[in-house]
Image (cartoon, rainbow, N blue to C red):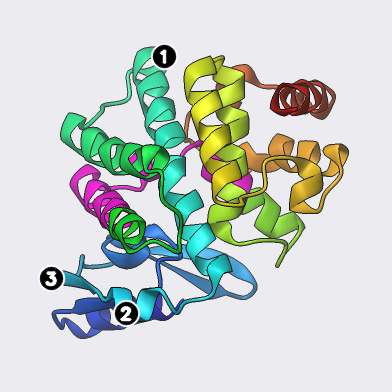
Amino acid sequence: RLIDTAKYAATELGLPMVAVATSLAHDGLASPVASLEREKATISYGVHTPLAVLADLDFIRRAPAAQLRSGVGDALTNLSATADWELSHRVTGEAVDGLALAIARTGAEAVLRHPGTIANDDFLASLANALIQGGLAMGMAGSSRPCSGGCHEIAHALQALHPGLAGHGEQGAIGALFCTWLRGDETLFAELAAAMRRHGLPRTPEELGLTVEELATAIECAPRTRPGRYTILEHRELDSVAISRHLTEMMHELD
């Protein structure tokens, strides 16, 4: 929350800001959004994008592994979020900023296909670039759309129903995996599942610390966290029974 608090304060005071990344837990480094807690609820505020972001790998490699895994998950969610944005464009006519979409997706694909791990500086550099690109994409789009679709709706629902369960990026990643499954994108599903396994991200309800039914309930509630946003979850309109069936089938595929 420190970077978000600093961005919010700098915006309120009308001061320029240079962000110094000491961890890579999320894509808020360069985003025009600050997510702050107010009365036990997370509220997003529009803020000025930092003038520059400095990512010092000497500090970043010392960050807790859980934070870095969360950052990996947050970067990977852009693949699902951009697919949701394109879906909304086809179905509802929502405008798409092609450059913002391409920037968000390119950074995520670099993380997806990089063979390294969070113990490798070259991978951490790719992760930092991806998270910064996500923030820039949101600034171009004027919203979180390039980086937030059904995947983040699920993450927000999990945070509300099971606070402290896992990092936001970890929750978003399993949301992205499920949304990709619903879209029937077999190639991306396989690549995403492999990357999540390589980086130790939870891919099943059990690995997340939930039952199938608990995760299904969160997914059913997810669209209510972002009213007006159209994603694969709104498109399919599944109830918890159907979601449980899809989760079970997805888990069999992962085996």
| Left or right for 83, reference 14 | right
Residue 251, quarter of the rendered image:
top right
- In this picture, which residue range is highlighted in magenta? 129-155
Dominant secondary structure of the residues highlighted in magenta in the image: helix
Residue matched to label 3: 51
54 part of magenta stretch: no
- Mark 2 or mark 1, earlier in chain: 2
* Helix, strand or loop at mark 3: loop
Locate residue 144, reporting x and y percent: 36, 48
| Left or right for 59, reference 165 | left
Residue matched to label 2: 58
Q: Residues within 10 Å of mark 2 (few under 14, many from 20)?
A: few
Query: What's the amino acid at mark 1?
Result: Val
- Mark 1 or mark 3, earlier in chain: 3
154 part of magenta stretch: yes
Seen at 23% across and 43% down, the residue is 141
Disc number for residue 91? 1
